[in-house]
Image (spheres, grey):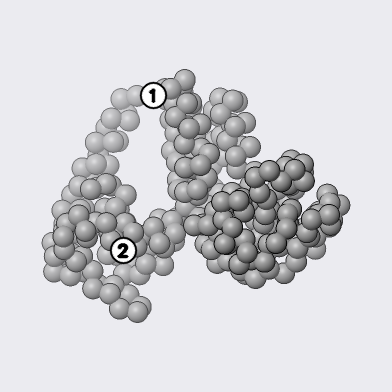
Amino acid sequence: MDIEALNTFLTLANTKNYTRTAAQLFVAQSTVTNRIHELEKELNIALFTRNNRSVELTVEGEQFKDYAEKVITLTNASLSEISSLHKYANHLRIGCSDSIYEGHLAPIILEHQRQFPNDALKITIGLSNLLMEQLQLHRQKSTLTNCKNTLFNRVRRTFDMLEVDKKTFEDEVLKAEGYVFVDFFGDGCVPCQALMPFVHEMADKYGDKIKFTSLNTTKARRLAIGQKILGLPVMAIYKDGEKVEEVVKDDATQESIEAMIKKYI
């Protein structure tokens, strides 16, 4: 039984709504659903009764809530006491999606912790639009600059663009509000590789005005076909989940890509 599951349970018990719980925890709604499902499976009881608009604690859920609150309180107290015994040289807070962490950041973070055990790291996993809200509200401070330059540079390169996959494309692109840029590329696509540094430059230049993502179609062929991606490279703009414009194959030049981006910022 992990702490994240208990925190999710307590938050859902308070909000009585999966969407609001996901927003408060900065995770996808499916993550909340999965955590509650696994917790109920582990306990072999139903913690909530569900209807179309809200959830309510069952009798067993009410009883478990008392225990969960005690566990969280004790855990937070112990962590606070332990952390007070150690003074860290640097502090780093990173926000990223599940796919970015698992596919890119995890090995970088582990390597850094081995080399610099006196650096304090805090990782927040969530949807990119919610993480951006945190950043704008100064909750995700830009303390990257206080850490080792090697880690900062490696993390910065990772965060130029959000790499989505067949599991996260719907949440990050189709369900996203506003404009989203998608770089559809594929393994072995030479023009795609040639354009990639330029696209990352665009993400650096316009990333505060439009969300930049990329999708490896080699690993998501059905998804690519569903989005009518029949040749590569493809650079597309989505608005509120609908594709509004794209440049394809030979038309995908640096000039045409930047011109398309400028139309929607």
Give the residue number, with chain letter if any, for mark 2.
12
Query: Residue lying farthest top?
Result: 115
Q: Amino acid at mark 1?
A: Lys
Q: Nearer the viewer, residue 144 or 158?
A: 158
Q: Nearer the viewer, residue 67 or 260?
A: 260
Residue at 83%, 49% (x, y): give it: 254
Q: In the displayed structure, would residue 146 be above or below residue 230?
A: above
To which quarter of the image does residue 246 belong?
Answer: bottom right
Residue at 51%, 31% (x, y): give it: 108
Q: Position of residue 57 (x, y in %)?
A: 21, 69
Dot label at residue 87: 1
Residue at 33%, 67% (x, y): give it: 15
Q: In the visual, does 77 lie left or right of 20?
A: left
Q: Secondary structure at mark 2?
A: helix
Q: Nearer the viewer, residue 213 or 64?
A: 213
Dot label at residue 166: none
